[in-house]
Amino acid sequence: MTAAADAGADRFARYPSLAGRVAFVSGGATGLGAEFVTQLAAQGVEVAFTDIDTEHGEALVREVAAAGLPEPWFAPCDVRDVPALQRVIGEAAAARGPITVLVNNAANDTRHPYTELDAEAFDDRIAVNLRHHLFAIQAVAPMMREQGGGSIINLGSISAHADFIGMVGYITAKAGIEGLTRTMARELGPDRIRVNCLIPGWVLTERQLREHITPADLETIRQKQCLAEPVVPADLARMLLWLASDDSAACTGQQWVVDGGWL
């Protein structure tokens, strides 16, 4: 079943407060981001998203629209280019309306020995995994304030809490996202803008299965988690929908872990 078809499954919750809202998702063309775009659209959200992967981004727009869901707005962008990211967010708002849900999702967990990192490479890991969160928040906060509030969801990682190695730049950035979430929740709370951190476990995305996960890794997942079933993108999307909706109106500055009980 495609993500677009599964997103409309009747057995999962619907959130009336999301219908007609405008959301912006970074890194939305594949993996978790594509699931977020699809699941939000299935709730009647006008979704805008960006990604460096133009081919998959355009394909996702067609897939979601073909499923009878609101057609997403897409523009390619590298989130490391802060002026370009903020410009794309502005263009999305001009096209679809004021953004009141922001999903800071774009990331890259490419493995690398710490001994091979130089200052430039480390700064790049921070830029692609952490820095853009703040500057996307800068771009959406004024429109959220004018609309009377909003929900910002930053994607963290279980790797900042568990015993993962081989990606020190990524893990450092993901730990920083938790601090960013806490302070921005305080900064923006008076404007009824909520900021939360969604922490995935080891999610079986297509990329993880293709590039990283081995049979030994699957066994590790089974041993580490309380639940035997692996975590899949839809598991994260269902928590994200709740955080985006008014059902979580009193929740901000928190870490929401979806990891099958690993931590």
Image (cartoon, rainbow, N blue to C red):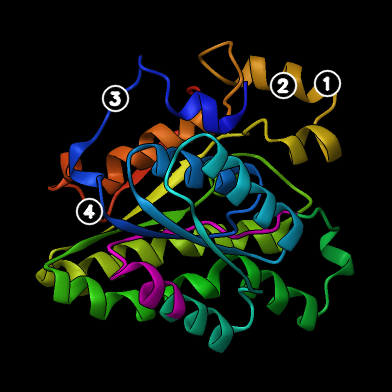
Rounded to the nearest angstrom, the CA distance separating label 1 from label 2 is: 6 Å
Residue shown at the point (37%, 80%) measured from the top left: 139
Q: Amino acid at mark 4?
A: Thr
* Disc 4 and disc 1 in contact, CB within 8 angstroms: no
Residue shown at the point (30%, 62%) measured from the top left: 182
Label 2: few (<14), some or many (≥20) within 10 Å? few
Residue at far right of view = 116
Rounded to the nearest angstrom, the CA distance separating label 2 from label 3 is: 31 Å
Residue shown at the point (62%, 47%) measured from the top left: 62
To which residue does mark 1 refer? 216
Q: Check the picture and name the quadrant holding the N terminus.
A: top right
> Residue 77 location in percent, x, y?
64, 74
| Image quadrant where residue 169 sits | bottom right
- In the image, 135 versus 43, the foreground residue is 43
* Disc 1 and disc 2 in contact, CB within 8 angstroms: yes
To which residue does mark 2 refer? 220
> Residue 70 location in percent, x, y?
42, 47
Is 108 colored magenta in this rendering?
yes
For the magenta stretch, what is the residue range? 91-109
Q: Amino acid at mark 3?
A: Ala
> Residue 4 location in percent, x, y?
54, 33
Q: Nearer the viewer, mark 4 or mark 2?
A: 4
- Image-based side of 1 in relation to 112, left or right: left
Q: Which mark is residue 13?
A: 3
> Residue 33 location in percent, x, y?
56, 49
Q: Is residue 112 above or below residue 203?
A: below
Q: Which mark is residue 252?
A: 4
- Per the image, label 3 sits on a secondary structure element best described as loop
* Disc 4 and disc 2 in contact, CB within 8 angstroms: no
